[in-house]
Amino acid sequence: MNKTYKLQLSKEEMKQYGYQVIDTIVEHFNTENTKHPVAYASREEMDDLFKIEAPKKAANYKDVLDFVTNKVLPNSNIVTHPKSYSFVPGPSNYVSVMADTLATGFNIFSGGWTASPAAAELEIVTMNWLLKLFKFPPIKGGGIFTSGGSMANLTALATARRQVCGDDFSKAIIYLSDQAHSSNIKAIRVLGFKKEQVRIIPTDIAYKIAINKLKNAIAKDRLEGFHPFCIIATAGTTNTGSIDALNDIAKICRAEKLWFHIDGAYGAAAILSKKGSQLLKGIEKADSLTIDPHKWLFQPYEMGCLLVRNHKWLHQTFTEKPEYLRDIEGNTSEINFYDHGIQLTRRFRALKLYMSIKTFGLSAFKKAITYSIDLAEDVENLLFCKIKLF
Ligand SMILES: Cc1ncc(COP(=O)(O)O)c(C=O)c1O
């Protein structure tokens, strides 16, 4: 059979293809600082470059690869660029890029234990590293890797609703500040809450949720017969990096029996630095915590993470037992991550965090985060001096 009818390359072609891809990536890692971090292009320009009907005939694989290298890759922002200030940065690292390549190359199914005991085990192991870092209960605690912070917030709020409200959430009220990330509102909407069930609490002059206003809103809702059930605090708001008063909110949640979710997608990784761990005191009291390794833990997209105080909460929220999965259930210590979140088929995300932490060591991550904070403070001081000069 003519090989162009098969979705395959010869072994030699595969190697050449792969070497060219690796060369392109390595060259990018070593020259990105000299490139322009932002790509500008209109829809018309992109249509002119790329718009075609799906080709019926095969093309030369080298031509396709060259076209992508020369036309697609330069027309994207470089979010790993040291001058990428216009967007939440996406610092990456080469080891994790290669880990993603291996995970994709072997197309490992990271949903159930039986499909890949090693993938499930590495997710457990890396999750335990994160649980320890955030001082969550080591054995009882749990979590799941998601595509990003938005999915982690959605997974958290679905879990909170199931645990606190059960099936009837008609009177449930959720509280978050006017600085909370939009993904939380999106999640609330996806979960079927009405607008009237959401309280957007104003922030104080430091852009932290105003504690008295939060307490008053809860008291008013109770008086009116509603069911306050969850507070979403932010550990690092996207607009200014402000951190809500986590200990105060934890106290309110304990007294009022509310679920305490913290969205730490932007800022929680700062716990690896001395200054950050001071600022994040109280983060360990959350019932659920979103972190986003594809932001400040130097992982390539897509990698978010949800941590919970009790792994059973995830299991109780997401388990479904279709017939075809019953015979691969295994014993309870053999975790099927499809029972801990929304996705059934999942890519092997844990591998990149595992390999990069194992290769560079946690201390390298600590240094990188400490350096980022020092750098931000230097820039702030510089700006402040300039403002004073003028
Ligand atoms: C505080 C916060 N939460 C959630 C998100 C959403 O995360 P993702 O873009 O990974 O879905 C972001 C993204 O910037 C964020 O800053």
Image (cartoon, helix red, strand yellow):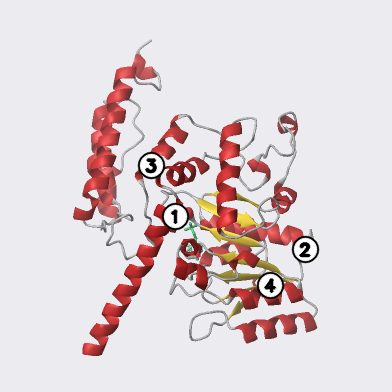
Residue with the mark numbered 3: 95
Does mark 3's beta carbon lie closer than 8 Å to ligand 1?
no
Which of label 4 and label 3 is nearer to you?
A: 3
Mark-to-mark CA distance, 4 and 2? 13 Å
**Which residue type does callout 1 highlight?**
Leu
Marker disc for residue 165: 2
Q: How many marks?
A: 4
Q: Which numbered disc, 2 or 3, marks the residue that appears first in the sequence?
A: 3
231 to the left or right of 66:
right
**Which residue type does callout 2 highlight?**
Cys
Which of label 4 and label 1 is nearer to you?
A: 1
Q: Which numbered disc, 1 or 2, marks the residue that appears first in the sequence?
A: 2
Instruction: Assign a secondary structure to mark 3.
Output: helix
Q: Which numbered disc, 4 or 2, marks the residue that appears first in the sequence?
A: 2
Specify few, some or many for label 2: CA neighbours under 10 Å numbering under 14, 14-19, or 20 or more.
some
In this rendered view, identify the residue nearer to me: 170 or 18. 18
Residue at (49% x, 69% y) in the render: 236
Residue with the mark numbered 1: 297
